[in-house]
Amino acid sequence: MISPFLQKARNYEETYEKHIKKEERPEFHLSPRVGWMNDPNGFSFYNGQYHLFYQYYPYDSHWGSMHWGHAVSPDLLHWTYLPTALAPDEAYDKDGCFSGSAVTLPDGRHLLMYTGVAKETQEDGTVRDVQRQCIATGDGINYEKYEGNPVLTESHLPSGSSRYDFRDPKLWQGDDGAFYAVIGNRPADGSGQILLFKSSDGFDWKFQQILCQNRGRYGKMWECPDFFELDGKQLLLVSPQDMLPQGFEYHNGNGTVCIIGSYDKEKQQFVEERNQAIDCGIDFYAPQTLLTPDGRRIMVGWMQNWDTCLPSTVQTPWFGQMTLPRELSVKNGRLFQNPVRELETMRRNEVRYRDITFTDILQLSGISGRKIDMELDLRPVDENQVYQKFAVRFAQDASHRTAVSFRPHESILKIDRKFSGSRRAVIHQRRSLVRHQNGRIRLRLILDRYSAELFVNDGEQVLSVSIQTDQRAEGISFFCDGLVSMDIVKYDLG
Ligand code: FRU
């Protein structure tokens, strides 16, 4: 049964998507069919296709009562929209179908678990959102909410835990065949904790453990957890609200943290070893991962951030986009991220230069564009006189540019979109400490109309930013204070 709320959203998106031209969206990054998008949800491989759902308000390009938008892809790059999957149409989710995830049931159905939000008037007259976990099952297009919803409520929470901050379940099936979920929650200390739940059938859920406690270390409430094994380590990804900066990391207010450790499955104990920011740019939040049929752990994040997305003045028919899906690995105890290898099939028109030595400003024939994959290999010409600063400027015309600059003597890489066409005084720059050998560094820049993602040293760090620059600004130029030598290979994507 399709509810009137869901039908309304489906009709609306079908009518209004026609007003958005293909060239007015990213080419291979998923954007909302119409209206607003935030977190990736239900990222999964089901019935031979990748499914990516998203937090969705179809009716305007700002956040509103949350639906789940839906798209499918054979290769994580070419997305086809499907009708809205969930609408807030039940008493227990009337104020929003918040973030969640998906697994396949033994009988072949796709199971979604999401956070149902319902406003409740308190004894003192204030109104608060109560958050509970709900389930819907379906065939990859239509989903039916479970009659036993909500399946996880305040009655399942350990004592002192908040019923107002209990959200964003991430599901997986264990080697034992049972289903597990990690869910974000706020304990009595006001910061965050991640709770572990278990179910033998996907419907009947029991609390297991407090898997990890923030204790005020990384921001406050932890949103959108993910928990998986990778390269012999166990990773917990969380998106903390209200973070304080630590050195050059965690400058985003709403940040993301990867905690790397080990996990004793029997005892359900996670032992933390180290932590790092997941993305060092400006626009990144709420990542979620899946395991591909060939065993790769792929992550996609929301390529926006609550701290910078709110005051957009540009009236766009869509707002928000996902990052490029990234292949994850752990090397020397650190998380590495690289664009999914499928991207290589989209490469066209190779332009290659070797050993270009230059100082001051350089432009190269064939090096331009707004949908590109470009690799730069930098080294000093004289090892005893390393250049002071290197920069690559892109999405450039007479009045616009976004720049990545690198100062080897300080080991600082900076991304700066101040002149990208934004009329808002939100943060436009981010600096990051990077590794290099005497000015030798590798950069890979992916542009897709409204974004830039910079992969440093084969995925050791990533910096993501969204830009609103007019598409006619497609120039690329290089700058060096000192003498640098570089190899370049650049492809158009599409
Ligand atoms: C994170 C988040 C989630 C919540 C959703 C609501 O960006 O706040 O915690 O489920 O967005 O749209």
Image (spheres, rainbow, N blue to C red):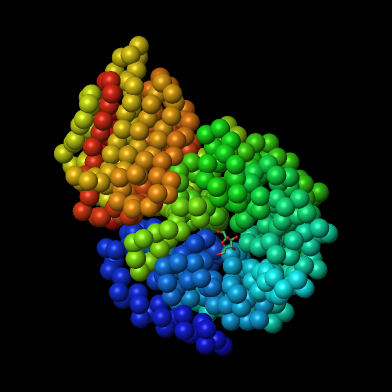
Q: Foreground: 95 or 258?
A: 95
Q: x%, y% of residue 127? A: 67, 71
Q: How many marks?
A: 0
The part of the image, by quadrant, that contains residue 16 is bottom left
Q: x%, y% of residue 416? A: 36, 41
Q: Foreground: 272 or 98?
A: 98
Name the residue located 81 percent from the left edge and 58 percent from the top edge: 160
Ligand 1: quadrant of the figure: bottom right
Q: Is residue 351 left or right of residue 422?
A: left
Name the residue located 34 percent from the left edge and 66 percent from the top edge: 315
Q: Is residue 451 left or right of residue 168?
A: left
Q: Foreground: 335 or 155?
A: 155
User: Please, which residue is most extreme toward the right here?
Assistant: 159
Name the residue located 45 percent from the left edge and 77 percent from the top edge: 83
Task: Say above or below: 289 vs 120.
Answer: above
Q: x%, y% of residue 208? A: 79, 58
Residue 347 shows in the view: no
Q: Is residue 329 left or right of residue 135?
A: left
User: Please, which residue is most extreme toward the front here?
Assistant: 124
The part of the image, by quadrant, that contains residue 98 is bottom right
Residue 55 shows in the view: yes
